[in-house]
Image: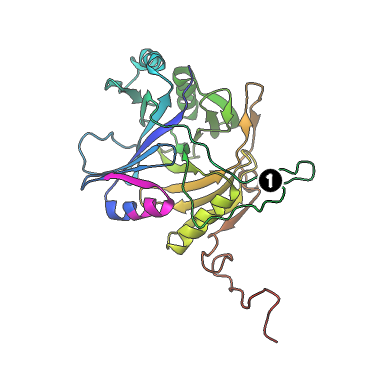
């Protein structure tokens, strides 16, 4: 039994109007809304819920709102859900809502599991030509005016006890270690075969609990750029990106979110199997990013933020 990935994330926030506009600009579809809750969906049915901070019945956060209150993971069927029920029933904060069971992890975060509500999708994605492998012939790569995220691919949390929290996810939910920052961070994936990480746990020098970011998978590198440029045109602030992570190989772009911390577009992460051997890294700027743009790219000029815009039909058409 292995988890299939993230089925739903639930934020707590007070400014639902701003969150509504942000996630619509981000590319999610608004499924339902009320004065107390917004429910969005991604392309494959992954749900993003923003609950008002005063809404009853929402799990408590590990830090003040706005933040991520709850992560819901998916399994394939009711038999797998029953196995999870047996594993979690003696854990702190255990809840059984019939179709959804869960507990709190060692940091205090609400963790829930349900039979997945996501559905398979078939998308046309960009092909890449390398020197040895010419996948794209007589075909231009796509360009996107905006992004439409496929799903929430991973979440990243600050934790107060890295060893205990990573052990919890491995022992009770079957997560597998992909890579480590010894004593500082642990990249975990849901199953032996899959993307580089679905969960990254990070312990600061002065440990605290909280959200670092929620990451949304898009189909290819061009959609990272198209989505990021659209968010820039809409006036949302880049934290960092675009850029590339050497550890997972993913192309990224991070934005500041009114629902808490950061959200990320990413694509092209490493695919791992049982044969993968976890590596150990020392934290540093070149380990975090092979390259990255601080402040992002302006969506109108298509240049680094605050850089001079080009003039002329062609870049070579400069006035004499």
Residue 27 falls inside the magenta stretch: yes
**Residue at the bottom extreme of this rendering:** 320
Q: Quadrant of residue 287?
A: top right
**What is the quadrant of the C terminus in the image?**
bottom right
Residue 140 showing in the rendered view: yes
Task: Name the residue beneath numbered marker 1.
Answer: 128
Left/right of residue 246 with respect to residue 47 in the rendered view = right
Front-most of 120 and 160? 120
- Residue 91 picture location, percent across and down: 35, 18
Q: Residue at x 51, y 64 (%)?
A: 299
- Residue 237 picture location, percent across and down: 45, 59
- Residue 314 picture location, percent across and down: 67, 74
Q: Quadrant of residue 296?
A: bottom right
Is residue 143 depicted above or below 272 in this figure? Answer: below
Q: Residues within 10 Å of mark 1 (few under 14, many from 20)?
A: few
**Residue at the right extreme of this rendering:** 132
Residue 216 falls inside the magenta stretch: no
The residue range painted magenta reads 21-32
Label tally? 1
- Label 1 element class: loop
Is residue 86 depicted above or below 308 in this figure? Answer: above
**Residue at the front extreme of this rendering:** 138
Front-most of 253 and 217? 217
Is residue 220 depicted above or below 228 in this figure? Answer: above
Q: Residue at x 55, y 62 (%)?
A: 297
Residue 15 showing in the rendered view: no
């Amino acid at each position: 039994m292995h988890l299939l990935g993230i089925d739903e994330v639930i934020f707590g926030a007070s400014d639902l109007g701003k969150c509504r506009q942000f996630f619509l600009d981000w590319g999610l579809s608004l499924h339902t809304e009320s004065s107390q809750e917004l429910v969005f969906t991604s392309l494959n049915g992954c749900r993003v819920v923003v609950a008002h901070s005063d809404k009853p019945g929402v799990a408590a956060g590990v830090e003040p709102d706005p933040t991520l209150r709850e992560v819901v993971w998916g399994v394939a069927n009711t038999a797998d859900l029953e196995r999870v029920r047996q594993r979690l029933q003696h854990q702190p904060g255990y809840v059984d809502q019939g179709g959804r069971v869960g507990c709190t992890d060692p940091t205090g975060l609400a963790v829930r599991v349900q039979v997945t509500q996501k559905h398979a999708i078939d998308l046309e994605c960009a092909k890449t030509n390398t020197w040895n492998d010419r996948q794209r012939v007589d075909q231009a790569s796509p360009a996107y005016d905006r992004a439409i995220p496929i799903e929430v691919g991973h979440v990243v949390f600050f934790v107060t006890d890295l060893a205990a929290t990573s052990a919890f996810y491995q022992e009770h939910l079957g997560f597998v270690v992909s890579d480590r920052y010894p004593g500082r961070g642990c990249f975990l994936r849901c199953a032996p075969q899959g993307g580089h990480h679905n969960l990254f746990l990070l312990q600061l020098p002065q440990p605290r609990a909280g959200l670092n970011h929620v990451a949304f998978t898009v189909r290819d590198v061009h959609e990272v750029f198209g989505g990021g440029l659209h968010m820039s045109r809409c006036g949302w602030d880049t934290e960092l990106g675009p850029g590339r992570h050497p550890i997972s190989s993913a192309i990224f772009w991070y934005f500041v979110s009114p629902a808490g911390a950061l959200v990320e577009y990413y694509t092209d992460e490493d695919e791992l199997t049982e044969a993968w051997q976890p590596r150990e890294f020392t934290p540093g700027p070149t380990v975090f990013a092979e390259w990255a743009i601080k402040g992002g790219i302006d969506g109108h000029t298509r240049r680094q933020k605050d850089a001079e815009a080009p003039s002329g039909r062609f870049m070579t058409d400069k006035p004499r």
